[in-house]
Amino acid sequence: MAPSEVASCSLPYVDLMEVALKVDVDTHQGLREGVPRLAEMLAAKGISATFFVAMGPDNSGRAIWRIVRNRGFVSKMWRTKAVSMYGWRTILSGTLLPSRPIASAFPGLLRDLINAGFEVGVHGYDHVRWQDNLDHLGERGISHEIERGLEVYHTLLGVPAHSFAAPGWRTNGVALGILDSKGLAYRSDTRGRQPYRCLVDGQVMLTPEIPTTLPTLDELMGTNGLRTPGDILKFYLSHFSESWLNVHTIHAETEGMSQFETFRGLVDRLLDRGAHFLRLDEVARGLSLSALPVCRVARITVPGRAGWVSAQGLSPSQA
Ligand SMILES: [Zn+2]
């Protein structure tokens, strides 16, 4: 993260390692295979987590077109062994093969998660459409993605959604404004250091933003000389903090599948260090809106990820 872009808001003292696990579910296969495996492992260890599920079609195959036009994506596909991780069915989904539904293919699985004590939130509707085209969708297109995502959630689970996590950590002023009118308990759209309220066009959003504080495993794989599961574990264990809330995003398609053992190893080591795991809605309940810093939303690049992501920016007083 570019240091000049990052807020240096004062951090609350935690004195205990607190870890909120955010599990992003981007694909049909990730929900079918990765999610039950992760849920079973976490439940057996008494760990709670928040699952953010894409509510619409699995068009992840469209990402293959990015190979043609985005060199960063080519190297990422290669470095992270995307084909062996995702499989050809997922990679071709929505292009040569029809797209499969994600959330609506497995409503029972989502209900099982909630019954087992996990939180389930909305990870957009069409993940690929949002991530690739957000700035070109216009107000109508963005509104459609948000409304459809919230609607499908309500239909499948019988209760309104109370949380949203932007696909690919990409958001803009229009999306933030629409989401702010939905009365959500919180959003988790960005990268950053601590919970904050977004400042958009001079307006302070009402919904707290709880950003991801650590790099993802797929970003680390192959970068910074981190080549083995041992290297990755060492990196994470030196970056999880006891001084502030750690929000760690994992993927059903990565940690729930090919990197399952690496992730299990990390969880065990964090438990050894006395980490307390909590759901993001529990974090949100503990926030005092008036005490949260107000920060702009910046766009940054992070090592190991193609293109931009949204991040906690400067407070107006720092600008
Ligand atoms: Zn995602």
Image (cartoon, rainbow, N blue to C red):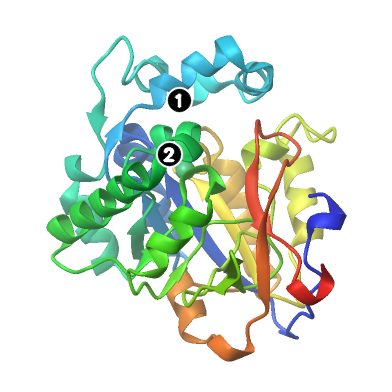
Q: Which mark is residue 130?
A: 2
Question: In the figure, residue 244 lies in which quadrant?
Answer: bottom right
User: Does dot 2 land on a helix, a strand or a loop?
Assistant: helix
Residue 210 in the figure: left or right of residue 182: right
Along the viewing direction, whichever of 100 and 180 lies nearer the viewer: 180
The image shows residue 132 at horizontal and vertical percentages of 49, 31
Mark found first going from the N terminus, 2 or 1: 1
Residue visible at 26% across and 24% down?
Answer: 99
The image shows residue 160 at horizontal and vertical percentages of 22, 68
Note whether ligand 1 is within 8 Å of mark 2: no
- The relative height of residue 3 versus residue 304 in the rendered view (above or below) is below
Residue visible at 38% across and 66% down?
Answer: 163
Residue carrying label 1: 86
Under mark 2, the amino acid is Trp
Q: Residues within 10 Å of mark 2 (few under 14, many from 20)?
A: many
Residue 42 in the figure: left or right of residue 199: left
- The relative height of residue 273 versus residue 100 in the rendered view (above or below) is below
Q: Which mark is residue 164?
A: none
Question: In the figure, residue 40 lies in which quadrant?
Answer: bottom left
Residue 205 in the figure: left or right of residue 76: left
- The relative height of residue 198 versus residue 124 in the rendered view (above or below) is below
Under mark 1, the amino acid is Tyr
- The relative height of residue 189 versus residue 286 in the rendered view (above or below) is above
Give the spatial CA distance, label 2 vs label 1.
Answer: 20 Å
